[in-house]
Image: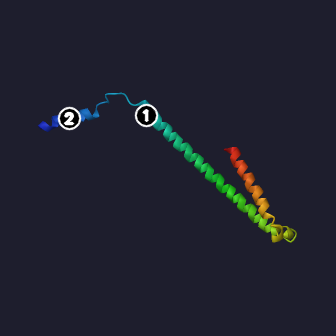
Amino acid sequence: MTAPNDAAMDAMLAAMLAPPTRAGDRNFTLQVERAIDAQAAYARARARFWRSFAFEALAIAALLAALWLLSSAPIFAPLASSTHWGLASPLLLILLLWFGTQRWRSA
C-alpha cells in the first residue's frame, strides 16, 4: 500500500534526521557562552548601580530635608540667611564631593 512518493519521503526524512557530517563548531559555542555570561554580568552590574544610585539619592534627599529643618530652627537661622550664603550649599558641595570620591574608589 505504499505509494511511490513514500519511498522518496522516507529517504528525505532519513537524510534530514541523519547526524551531521562534520563536528560542531566548538569555538562558536564558546563565543556564544561567553557573550551570554558577559550580558548577564552586565545586567547584574547595571542593577547594582541603579540600586546604589537610588539609595544614595534617598540619602541625599534625607540630608537636604535635615538641613532644611535645621536651617529653620531659631538657633541656626543666622547661619542659613542669604547674607551668609546659607549653611546648606557648602555642606552639600562637601557631601557630593565625598559621594563622588567614594564612587570612584569602588570602581
Alpha carbons under labels 1 and 2: distance apart = 33 Å
Tag 1: amino acid: Phe
Q: Position of residue 106 (x, y in %)?
A: 69, 44
Residue depicted at 69% across the width and 48% down the height = 103
Q: In this view of the protein, which residue sits in the foreground, 2 or 88?
A: 88
- The answer to which quarter of the image holds residue 76 is bottom right
Q: In this view of the protein, which residue sits in the foreground, 70 or 93?
A: 93
Is residue 72 visible to the viewer in this orientation of the structure?
no
Q: Residue furthest top?
A: 22
Left or right, 35 with reference to 104: left
Q: Quadrant of the C terminus?
A: top right
Is residue 89 visible to the viewer in this orientation of the structure?
yes
Estimate how packed mark 1 is, as few (under 14), some (14 to 19) or many (20 or more) residues with alpha carbons within 10 Å.
few
Secondary structure of the residue carrying numbered label 2: helix
Image mark count: 2
Left or right, 7 with reference to 32: left
Rendered image: mark on residue 28: 1
Residue depicted at 34% across the width and 27% down the height = 22
Rendered image: mark on residue 74: none
Secondary structure of the residue carrying numbered label 1: helix
Estimate how packed mark 2 is, as few (under 14), some (14 to 19) or many (20 or more) residues with alpha carbons within 10 Å.
few
Left or right, 101 with reference to 8: right
Tag 2: amino acid: Asp
Image vertical order of residue 106 relative to residue 92, above or below: above
Residue occupied by mark 2:
10
Q: Quadrant of the N terminus?
A: top left
Q: How is the image coloured?
A: rainbow
Image vertical order of residue 90 relative to residue 26, above or below: below
